[in-house]
Amino acid sequence: MTEQRTDGQPADGTESHDHDFPEAFLAFMRQGWRDTTLPVGPRVEVPNHAKRRAALSAAFPGETLVIPGGGEKVRANDTEFRFRPGSDFVYLTGDHAPDSVLVMRPNGSGHDATLYMRPRASRETDEFFRSRHGELWVGRRHTLAEKSTELGLPTAELAELEPALADLAPGRTRVLRGFDRHVDAAVRPYDGPREQGQPGRDRELATAIAELKLIKDEWEIAQLQDAVDATVRGFEDVARVLPADRAVSERLLEGIFALRARHDGNDVGYGSIVGAGEHATILHWVHNHGVTRPGELLLMDMGVENRNLYTADVTRVLPVDGRFTPLQRQVYDIVYASQQAGIDFIKPGVKFKDVHLTCMRVLAEGLHDLGLLPVSVDEAMDEKSTVYRRWTLHGFGHMLGIDVHDCSNARKEMYREGVLGEGYVLTVEPGLYFQPEDDLVPEELRGVGIRIEDDVLVTATGAVNLSAGLPRRADEVETWLAEQREAGPACPADPPVRPRGGPRRRCATTLSPTRRWRGPSPFRAPRPPGRPLPSLPPGRGP
């Protein structure tokens, strides 16, 4: 990567890249450039974002609302992480550019919304080649007019934001804090109770947005299906390179899925969990430095974030050698029955916590059948006991959307202690985990971890499994794995080119075809004789 240098200053990318260009070079760079335009048009989702802003406006009449998108974060020295804007900002605008800020000012009958942004600089300045934000360094930005056309929002220069914020009355202003330190400093928090680091009034803004996000509109559901479909293809890619008879590194499998995520979407929606053997018993295992072994299980919890930043969240457990052992299948069937009971129970009006209890009772009954519970199922389920949770620490699931753990700022009575509504999308992901050092379980169970997770849409009459394209039953998983191995590694097929904002293809829950790779496997680099496999670090072989 080209170093972003500053003369006499640390190379942190905060200054112009070179203060000492010769005047002859500067004069030469300032001439002979043709103007360019971006072929932008209104995005199809513009009306959806406008409806969300209108709903937020109705919740806070007469108050100014400030919602930043956030800026780039330093990874190391003068390099940044790949930028991903704040989810609430994206939910209200659809914009993905760093440093932008949405300001909604009361106008008597509602609010006027303005997007403050860093627009493309004129070629009459040196910004395009001297600034860290310049076109020759990071690419062309939108002009104010282009961005306004694309998002259906009035736009203004980011430089105008500071004086605009200086005139706001703290008692009539709410800020989504923690995303932009400049905005946080510019608007003094109004004195009030604090909760989770947010002043009380500002916390209410975050809560209101979270509760709007509970119900997904048709466009959002299509985005989630798009993310799920790409995730299914990613699991297929991984299964095709998973050997049955030798070890392979968890990180190789993680990387195969990441390739699909970047090709078909924006990125992975969260750190991929690829747990082989006893690593499957660690709920959020993201180190992924282990290896698979024949006879053991492989747990993969992964999701593609699509190009509009909606994410899937799916978990599957595969028998590495292709077949579950009788005991592995027995535990798997308990988890499957728990998940199916939860999905069958879901419909509008049922309590979120009752879905949890439905799943947990099936797990407790299974643990009782395995002879592990020290008490009866009813006693284990009693809220003063819950001893069954020794082998399942987490809940049945969570809301899903533009965040993998969506709507987390919603009030308890609207989410964890509330009822489900039509248009909710949530995960159902029960699991059982037997730690390798647990002396209360038989030796053959130690190191076994199984979780099955799917993404479920609440409909008027029940639930639809958006991730049904991946098999769940044990025998179906075995058949599917064999089919993928028979098909062999595949190169991701290029999707049809769709102009941004143009009509989207109808999503399907079935597997999309992949183009067979006719050359050497893109996932297996040639190696000289005697060289150890890259997936087997020294000391970590089977």
Image (cartoon, rainbow, N blue to C red):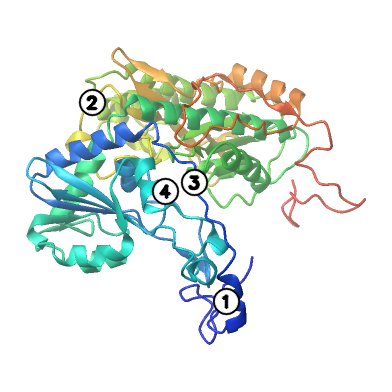
Badge 1: residue crowd in 10 Å (few <14, some 14–19, many ≥20): few
Of label 1 and label 3, which has the lower sequence position? 1
Quarter of the figure with residue 431: top left
Asked which secondary structure carries label 4, the reply is: loop
Asked which secondary structure carries label 1, the reply is: helix
Of label 2 and label 3, which has the lower sequence position? 3
Quarter of the figure with residue 121: bottom left
Q: From the viewer's perspective, is the residue at label 1 or at label 2 nearer? A: 1
Tell me the quarter of the image containing the C terminus: top right
Of label 2 and label 4, which has the lower sequence position? 4
Residue at x-position 53% and y-position 87%: 8
Q: Which mark is residue 351?
A: 2
The residue that label 1 is drawn on is 27
Q: In the picture shown, does residue 129 fall above or below 259?
A: below
- 463 or 446: nearer the viewer: 463
What is the x, y in percent for residue 334? 47, 23
Find the distance from the CA under tag 1 to the CA under tag 3.
Answer: 27 Å
The residue that label 3 is drawn on is 38
The residue that label 4 is drawn on is 96
Badge 3: residue crowd in 10 Å (few <14, some 14–19, many ≥20): few
Find the distance from the CA under tag 4 to the CA under tag 3.
Answer: 16 Å
